Amino acid sequence: MRRFKQQINLKSSGQSGFAAIEMIVVLILVVAALGIGSQAMFDHADNMAGQSAADHQKIISDAASAYIKDNYAAVLNVATPTEPANITVGMLKNTGYLPPSMTDINNFGQSYSVLAIKPTANKLQTLVITTGGETIPETSIRRISKQVGARGGYISNIDTSVVEGTYGGWNVSLAPYGISPGEGHLATALFFDDGALTNDYLYRNAVPGHPEVNEMNTSIDMKGNNLNNAANVNATNVNATTVNASNAAVTGTVKAGTTDTTGETYTGGWFRTRGDTGWYNEKWNGGWYMTDPSWVRSYGDKGVYTGGAIAGGTLQSNGRTTIGEYLQLNGVATEGAACSPNGLVGRNAAGLTLSCQSGAWKGAGSIRGIGSGFMTGGAGTYVNQMTGGFNCPAGLIPVLTGGQVNGSCQPCFMYSCVLP
């Protein structure tokens, strides 16, 4: 019995130790959960406080903007490049631009100053800036500035002499405004030109009646980043290292060092080359070119082949001419008529081949002849060629062409006077 009681006591002691460990683990988890929950609650409260400050800043800024537009001449008359016109929240309430119940400070205890300077004639640069109160931490002040929008800005702990715009979109020196609130304070920029609000930052959306808020007054440096999803880009000049495009429609002139196309090239006008060049086939090392005003030449002395016709005023061959079928002579001449130069070949109306010899067209039967006659042995007009000479014109020689019986002339011989 005593031993049994000891076993029970040992078992109870072990169970108590395990329960204590479980309790410690649960307490650790509860503490961790409370820490996470507390941080989440703190972040939520911080975001709510920041949004409240941003909304309050926008209300004061909108009221100041409306006041300046309605009282532009009066504000312009007071402001100078170094002495700002000071518009208080009380003035905005008294003139009805803010309700009387509007608080003069934001939820960080910061009050507002509306300061307008006149950098040039008819222009106002205005800051709605907070002073005093709590110093808003750097991370919070940046977030609140973004919540205000593109007009929003803040004084950073990096440089307390300027107001830095949201995302670095603008910055304004505080020196001309004669104020130095220190880090952790909010600001809004309002820029006016002839009474119209024209902030020096680019609006994402159109503002009716104010196209200038969507215009750039200086160059944009993209720092190597892309400009994506543009519908149409209208520009006077485009300077680029490489242009990649599916299609290009150009109504003017395209100038390039080298044009390399992998497909067809079409032109509705002339295909022009400059210099002693022309068209060149890179694969077969041939083409057409000109090096003088008279001749179109075959590059690489390539031959010209066509199953069609070649037409020209004059066809000249400096070597042999080979004709695979017939030679058609369309030049019709009259035998005996004058011609020039010697060596021309033509035909008569019947198709007989004629050639130009000694300045006259002659047929094939008289290629060397100039005339003919009869002679007899010792009788008649001529002397027998066997015993004497023929009576031929100077420069011609007689050629006996055969015997002939002619009346009482037996035997008679026919001869021709021909070129030697």
Image: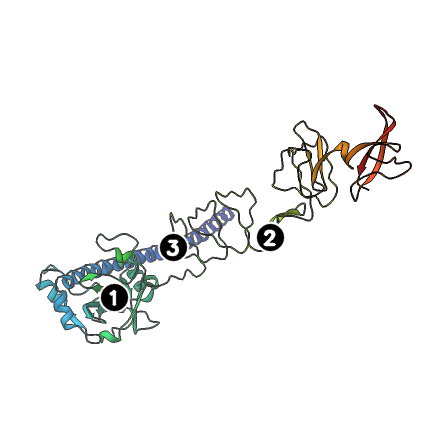
The residue tagged 1 is: 187
Q: Secondary structure at mark 1?
A: strand
Q: Given the image, on which type of amino acid does mark 1 rest?
A: Ala
Q: Given the image, on which type of amino acid does mark 3 rest?
A: Ala
Which numbered disc flags the more N-terminal residue, 3 or 1?
A: 1
Question: Does residue 4 appear in this view?
Answer: yes
The residue tagged 2 is: 277
Compared with 215, 159 (above or below) is below
> How far is mark 3 from mark 1, CA to CA?
36 Å
Image coordinates for residue 127, horizontal then vertical, percent? 22, 67
* Image disc number at residue 395: none
Marks 3 and 1: which is nearer the front?
3
Between 380 and 386, which is closer to the camera in this rendering? 380
The residue tagged 3 is: 235
Q: Given the image, on which type of amino acid does mark 2 rest?
A: Thr
Between 18 and 354, which is closer to the camera in this rendering? 354
Residue at image x 71%, y 34%? 354
Are there few (<14), some (14-19), or many (20+) residues within 10 Å of tag 1? many
Are there few (<14), some (14-19), or many (20+) residues within 10 Å of tag 2? some
The image quarter in which residue 102 lies: bottom left
Compared with 96, 300 (above or below) is above
> How far is mark 2 from mark 1, CA to CA?
69 Å
Between 263 and 124, which is closer to the camera in this rendering? 263
Image coordinates for residue 133, horizontal then vertical, percent? 22, 69
Image quadrant in which the C terminus is located? top right
Image coordinates for residue 323, horizontal then vertical, percent? 72, 34
> How far is mark 2 from mark 3, CA to CA?
35 Å
